[in-house]
């Protein structure tokens, strides 16, 4: 949304994409309704920024948990491989097969 000066008037327009993909502008007015719409949009943008910051903070907090999960995954893979080898299996083209004979 942007305020544009057309002639001697300052008008609020909102940009959007039409069904055929072209950018269009919708006239929202010059008065109190346009100002209220601008305030609503500004508050929505502020809320989106706050949500993005919260998501980034949560992602940063989960980095150690992700590292521990990766270590656990590697340990389980090692344990499964050892168990299968002791049970007489071998790996052939990334699949486990029972040894012949």
Image (cartoon, rainbow, N blue to C red):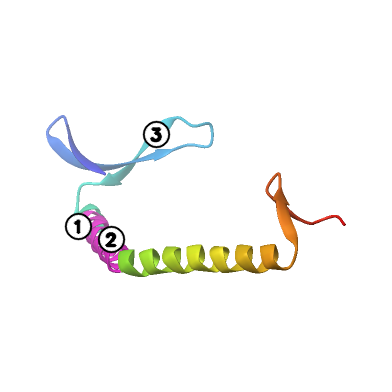
Q: How many marks?
A: 3
Asked which quadrant contains residue 8, the reply is top left
- Which mark is drawn over residue 56? 2
Q: Nearer the viewer, residue 47 or 61?
A: 61
Q: Using the rendered view, name the quadrant where residue 3 is placed.
A: top left
* Mark 2 Cα shell of 10 Å, populated few (<14), some (14-19), many (≥20): few
Quarter of the image with the C terminus in it: bottom right
Report the mark closest to the observer, 3 or 2. 2
Task: State the extent of the magenta-drawn residues as a range.
Answer: 38-61
C-alpha distance separating marks 1 and 3:
23 Å
Measured as percent of width and height from the top left, residue 56 is found at: 28, 60
Label 2: which secondary element = helix
The residue tagged 1 is 32
Q: CA distance from mark 1 to mark 2?
A: 36 Å
Task: Give x and y (percent) for residue 100.
Answer: 85, 55
Q: Which mark is residue 24?
A: 3
Q: Residues within 10 Å of mark 3 (few under 14, many from 20)?
A: few
Q: Position of residue 78 (x, y in %)?
A: 55, 64
Q: Secondary structure at mark 3?
A: strand
Q: Residue 4 — which label?
A: none
Residue 57 magenta: yes
């Amino acid at each position: 949304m942007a305020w544009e000066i057309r002639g001697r008037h300052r008008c609020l327009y909102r940009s959007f994409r039409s069904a055929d993909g072209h950018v269009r502008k919708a006239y929202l007015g010059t008065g109190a309704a346009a100002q209220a719409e601008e305030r609503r949009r500004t508050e929505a943008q502020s809320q989106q920024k706050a949500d993005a910051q919260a998501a980034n903070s949560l992602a940063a907090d989960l980095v150690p948990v992700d590292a521990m999960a990766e270590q656990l995954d590697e340990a389980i893979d090692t344990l499964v491989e050892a168990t299968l080898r002791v049970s007489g299996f071998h790996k052939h083209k990334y699949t486990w097969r029972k040894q012949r004979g």
